[in-house]
Amino acid sequence: MSPFNLLFDAFIAWPRRVAAHLYWLGPLFARLTTGWVFLWSGWGKLQNLPQVTANFVDWGIPFPHVLTPFVSGVEFFGGLFLLLGLLTRISAGALGITMIVAIKAAKWSGVDSLETLLGFDEFEYLALFLWLAIAGAGPLSLDWLLTRLRYSGAPAGLVSQPA
């Protein structure tokens, strides 16, 4: 075997084979981590809507009396759905949008470099939400189970088969 093939196998092929057995772990860990954080963040906002509304007003977010309970609900239910792995792509997309708005409204004035922007927790969450919105919930999720039921040999009449 050539030195190139040995290096390729050691540093690319072998790690890829190992990762193939653990592909379920990434989405699960990302969902549980972000889901837990946003479930409780949303719950806290829902319990303190007047103060959060005042913050939205200070940040210049339009329609704060409408958007405060809406965003709080997105965080709470989005976090819950991520924990369950249910409606993951939609939940991650909605939570990603809230992170973009949070960066723009509350953090943007403090951005003086790419390093600063990338260092915000909100940007890190945005990256995870983008990945979950694209990759999906993974096999340890209700999304996966519902998809398997929908397209597998479920009992006749329980689910319809794809055309």
Image (cartoon, rainbow, N blue to C red):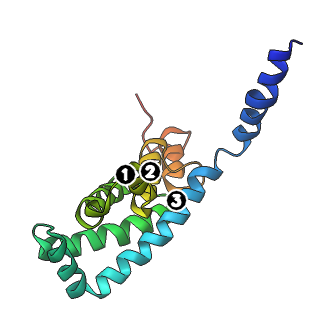
Q: Nearer the viewer, residue 82 or 42?
A: 42
Q: Secondary structure at mark 2?
A: helix
Mark 2 neighbour density, 10 Å: few (under 14) some (14–19) many (20 or more): some
Q: Which residue is mark 2?
A: 127
Q: Nearer the viewer, residue 147 or 48?
A: 48
Distance CA(mark 2)–CA(mark 1) = 18 Å
Q: Residue at x 38, y 64 (%)?
A: 78
Q: Which residue is mark 3?
A: 31
The vertical placement of 155 against 65, above or below, is above
**Measured from the top left, where is residue 152 in percent x and y?**
55, 39
Q: Is residue 79 visible?
A: yes
Which numbered disc, 3 or 2, marks the residue closer to the eye? 2
The vertical placement of 91 against 68, above or below, is above
Q: Secondary structure at mark 1?
A: loop
Q: Is residue 158 left or right of residue 109?
A: right
**Measured from the top left, where is residue 144 in percent x and y?**
53, 49
Q: Earlier in the sequence, mark 3 or mark 2?
A: 3
Q: Secondary structure at mark 3?
A: helix
Mark 1 neighbour density, 10 Å: few (under 14) some (14–19) many (20 or more): few
The three-letter amino acid code for the residue at tag 3 is Arg
Distance CA(mark 3)–CA(mark 1) = 29 Å
